[in-house]
Image (tube, rainbow, N blue to C red):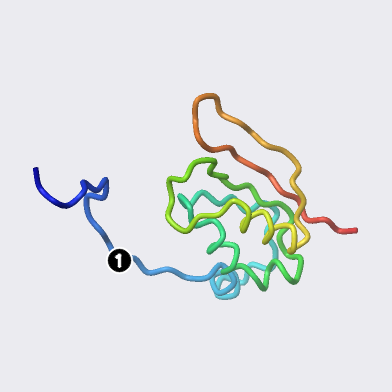
Amino acid sequence: MGGSPKSSFIYEEKVNVMKLDDFCNDHKISNIDLLKIDTEGHEKEVLEGALNLIKEKKIKYILLEFHLSKMYKNYSTKDLENFLDNSNFRLLKKYKFPLLFFEDRIYGLDTE
């Protein structure tokens, strides 16, 4: 049998991306009540792209998919939790799905 391991990737595609800070600035969005993030392992990058909104306390709640498996390269649940904690977001609720390797988590801005 051949030498290279099989990959589950079928193809790769380049896409244009924009930081959430820039998008909100361009579209004159001053605050976000609920930010839902489901980016298949890139949740922290999305949050980093919203750093100004987060620092200025312009996001009230964040709902994100929290992966419990080692499916994504360079994905760290601990880094994600630390980022949210250091940004004054507190875990409010976990929504677990039977037999699945992720859960949705909602975080709220700690205003105290």
Amino acid at pointer 1: Lys
The image quarter containing residue 30 is: bottom right
Neighbor class of circle 1 (other Cα within 10 Å; few <14, some 14-19, many 20+) is few
What residue lies at 51% left-to-right and 49% top-to-bottom? 38
In the displayed structure, would residue 9 be above or below residue 21? above
- 86 or 110, which is in the foreground? 86
Relative to residue 18, is residue 22 drawn left or right? right
Q: Quadrant of the C terminus?
A: bottom right
- Give the residue furthest to the top: 98
Q: Secondary structure at mark 1?
A: loop
Instruction: Indicate whether 73 appears above or below 105.
Output: below
Q: Which residue is rendered at x = 59% and y = 71% of the image?
A: 21
Q: Position of residue 8 (x, y in %)?
A: 26, 45
- Residue at 42% in and 55% down: 73
Q: 104 left or right of 2?
A: right
Residue 19, x across and y down, in percent:
52, 70
Q: Quadrant of residue 48?
A: bottom right
| Location of residue 46 in the rendering, given as x and y in whole percent from the top left corner | 54, 62
Q: Which residue is mark 1?
A: 14
Report the residue at 56% width, 70% height from top: 27
Report the number of numbered marks. 1
Residue nearer the viewer, 53 or 70: 70
Which of 57/30 is in front? 57
Left or right: where 38 falls relative to 54: left
Q: Quadrant of the N terminus?
A: top left
